Image: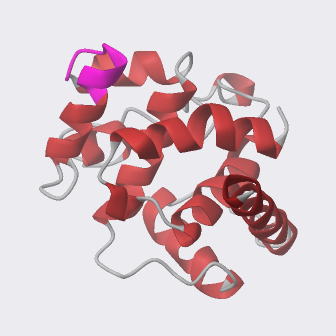
Amino acid sequence: MSLDEVIRSAVAPALAILPSAMDSQPARVMLTAIGLQESHFTARRQMNGGPARGLWQFEQGTAKSRGGVWGVYLHDASRYWLNVLCEARHVAFDPVAIYGALEHDDVLAAGVARLLLFTDPSKLPAADDTAGAWALYLRTWRPGKPRPESWPDFHRQAVDAGVAYRNAEEA
């Protein structure tokens, strides 16, 4: 899927469901860069039989670990908006149901990814802050096998796609 398609068919519709303050250039860049890093926007199920689902590769997590879907479900900052997102996407407000739907609902997956970023207490890094974006990704996704060598290129692609999308909206 091209970055333009991802932004138009998943990211923009997800952000339209969430509060307008969650839709910003830095948020779009983060979502695009993380999707590239996690799945290249090609895999909705983790390769090698892993547990992650959706283009942003979310695990279900557990109530005890407070990771993955469970983390977004339990977090005070995201819980209400996750419920709004689930209602809009006709998904039961339940971590198991949400996790099951991520593989097939790119809008839900983009929304859950944005909500995970929202749980971080720090402000989103500026759209052109590659190092800040990497640090946020590490804090929120906690990847088991981070690939720092690929991040700068993915982040640049995300910035370029975000600028192109913004220019198309303004035209």
Q: Give the side of residue 23 with respect to residue 51, left or right.
A: left
State the image coordinates of residue 72 (x, y, percent, origin top left). Answer: 28, 46
Q: Is 91 one of the magenta-colored residues?
A: yes
Furthest residue toward front: 171
Q: Quadrant of the N terminus?
A: top right
Residue 58 to residue 108: above or below: below
Q: Quadrant of residue 166?
A: bottom right
Q: Residue at x 57, y 43 (%)?
A: 11
Q: Is 26 one of the magenta-colored residues?
A: no
State the image coordinates of residue 113 (x, y, percent, origin top left). Answer: 46, 47
Q: Residue at x 30, y 32 (%)?
A: 85
Can residue 145 be seen in the rendering of this structure?
A: no
State the image coordinates of residue 155 (x, y, percent, origin top left). Answer: 76, 69
Q: Give the side of residue 37 with respect to residue 62, left or right.
A: right
**Coloring scheme used:** secondary structure
Q: Residue at x 64, y 64 (%)?
A: 29
Q: Give the side of residue 29 with respect to residue 20, left or right.
A: right
Can residue 106 be seen in the rendering of this structure?
A: yes
Q: Quadrant of the C terminus?
A: bottom right
Label total for image: 0
Residue 83 versus residue 120: which sits nearer the camera? Answer: 83
Residue 85 versus residue 58: which sits nearer the camera? Answer: 85
State the image coordinates of residue 13 (x, y, percent, origin top left). Answer: 50, 36
Q: Quadrant of residue 69?
A: top left
* Magenta segment: 86-93
Residue 105 to residue 119: above or below: above
